[in-house]
């Protein structure tokens, strides 16, 4: 499990936000919440959010803190918790250093660890301000992500979702 955490940081640093696709479960039960608010209700909405980030973030350097904690629940379930820091470079060249705290359940299926949900993504403070993403009904009753400026920070894992 600790190797999984290091793989996440390495791959996100090397590949950018697209790497999160490999670590988020594609199951219908996937969800992500942050600061008490639902960010993504399923894997489809998370994939759309990651796609948006790949267009706005040029590079990321993600590091877990020395306080990385893994609490095994079963041989195939564990809770991961850690402080994190990252340097993000936006497509326009803007640079932001951010810090926060991440907790998630990880599940091993078919020999691979993934996050079946990310119930708690900690706050951070970036130089660009802070952003909150919430799902809201769109035309036709489908759910679509939307961003608006708030005093909360919201992220995919540790990736800040920019306002639209």
Image: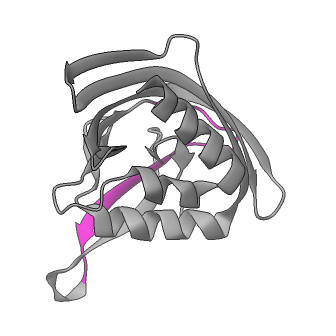
Q: Position of residue 119 (x, y in %)?
A: 27, 38
Residue 20 in view here: yes
Q: Is residue 124 magenta?
A: yes
Left or right, 133 with respect to 66, comes to left
Tell me if residue 96 comes above or below residue 27 in the rendering: above
Q: Tell me where residue 99 appears, x and y as whole percent.
A: 59, 27
**In the image shown, does 34 or 4 lie closer to the viewer?**
4
Residue lying furthest front: 111
The image shows residue 7 at horizontal and vertical percentages of 56, 38
Q: Residue furthest right?
A: 93
Given residues 52 and 44, the one toward you in this image is 44
Q: Depth check: 160 or 54 in front?
A: 54
Q: Residue at x 25, y 19 (%)?
A: 72
Residue placed farthest to the top in the image? 67
Q: Position of residue 138 (x, y in %)?
A: 25, 79
Q: What span is colored magenta in the figure?
A: 123-138
> For the N terminus, which image quadrant?
top left
Relative to residue 108, is residue 10 drawn left or right? right
Which residue is at a point 66% across and 65% down the rendered structure image?
A: 56
Residue visible at 39% across and 22% down in the picture: 81
């Amino acid at each position: 499990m600790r190797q999984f955490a290091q793989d996440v940081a390495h791959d996100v640093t090397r590949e950018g936000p697209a790497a999160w696709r490999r670590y988020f479960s594609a199951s219908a039960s996937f969800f992500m919440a942050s600061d008490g608010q639902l960010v993504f209700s399923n894997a489809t909405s998370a994939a759309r959010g990651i796609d948006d980030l790949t267009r706005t973030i040029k590079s990321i350097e993600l590091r877990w803190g020395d306080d990385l904690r893994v609490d095994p629940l079963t041989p195939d379930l564990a809770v991961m918790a850690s402080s994190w820091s990252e340097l993000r470079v936006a497509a326009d060249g803007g640079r932001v250093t951010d810090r926060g705290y991440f907790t998630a359940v990880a599940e091993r299926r078919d020999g691979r660890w993934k996050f079946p949900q990310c119930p708690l993504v900690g706050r951070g403070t970036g130089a660009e301000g802070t952003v909150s993403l919430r799902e809201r009904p769109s035309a036709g009753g489908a759910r679509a992500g939307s961003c608006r400026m708030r005093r909360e920070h919201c992220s995919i894992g540790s990736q800040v979702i920019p306002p639209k």
